Amino acid sequence: MQPGCKLSPRLKIHSTLLSILFTTAIAGVLSISAAAIFSFSLLTKMVERMVSLSVGIMLSTSLLHALPEAFESKADTRSLFACLLAGLLGFFLLEKFAVLRHSHHHEGDGHHHEHGHDAHEAGKAGWMILVGDGMHNFTDGILIAAAFLANPELGFVTAFAIIAHEIPQEIGDFIVLLNAGFSRMRAYMYNLACSMMGVLGGVIGYFTLERASNLIPYVLVMASSGFIYIAVSDLMPQMQRRATMRETIIQVILVTMGILLVLFVTRHR
């Protein structure tokens, strides 16, 4: 190509699509791997107490980041609240289905299988967190695609911000999965598979930008409803079973740390 020549529209389109594919895939792999390294090296011996940290991360991500972003859009407020209600009820039904189909968790008799962190009850939360995480990654992929189509430099900056945003959330996801009885490798592989939803979101966002961008607030609300439901219905009841003053103080500290962590990494977004 001679100096001064510009890319043809077709080549520019292909270049943008490849950039979106590459960036969404790398963002997913980096955030999952970084979270796994941190979780597996530092947190596995404290999984029981780290449930509190996960509660802080999930609630603050949903209530202080994703939901405000959705409600600041041009979407109808009543429709967003209806979506939130539908999401909460949907995850309730998903949980009921999981209980009916998987009540044989571990040994299968449904009685007294305490493994130090209520794994028989936490198992359902593991699958639900993967569903919510996949939806969240899908939305991130759409956001990256939109940024690349506006400006390639903005696309890379957005991807970098999403990686920083995802790492603390993925740590929370790993904690939930370990608490649910997943092995380290299984938790990593399932989380990695969910992260590839970002690639799908990027492709769909690229080809149907206007329509997809109108759906972003609703996808954010649906993903948030999953995180809120899991934190409130599954994880916080586990915390309530340890009601000593010492444990309560530790739980409050860890929940606060989770909130501050999300606020720190999202302060520039």
Image: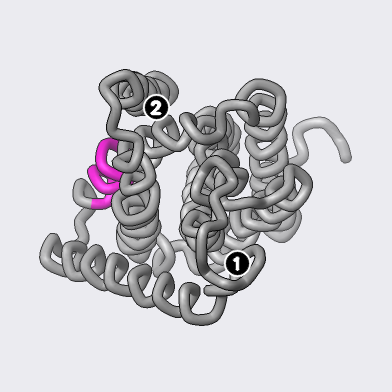
Which residue, as the protein is rendered here, is positioned at the far front? Answer: 112
Which residue, as the protein is rendered here, is positioned at the far left? Answer: 78
Percent of width and height locating residue 90: 34, 74
Tell me, yes or no, whether the highlighted magenta stretch contains residue 255: no
Vertical side of 118 occupied by 87: above or below = below
Percent of width and height locating residue 35: 63, 32
Q: Is residue 192 visible?
A: yes
Going from the N terminus, do you reach mark 1 or mark 2 first?
A: 1
Q: Which residue is mark 2?
A: 258
**Residue at horizontal 31 percent and vertical 51 percent from the top:** 228
Which quadrant holds the N terminus? top right
Task: Indicate left or right for 196 with 144 as reference.
Answer: right
- Magenta highlight range: 62-70
Task: Indicate left or right for 1 with 186 as reference.
Answer: right
**As shown in the figure, which amino acid type bears the numbered disc 2?**
Gly
* Res 105 label: 1
Near mark 2 (Cα within 10 A), the count class, few <14, some 14-19 or many ≥20, is many
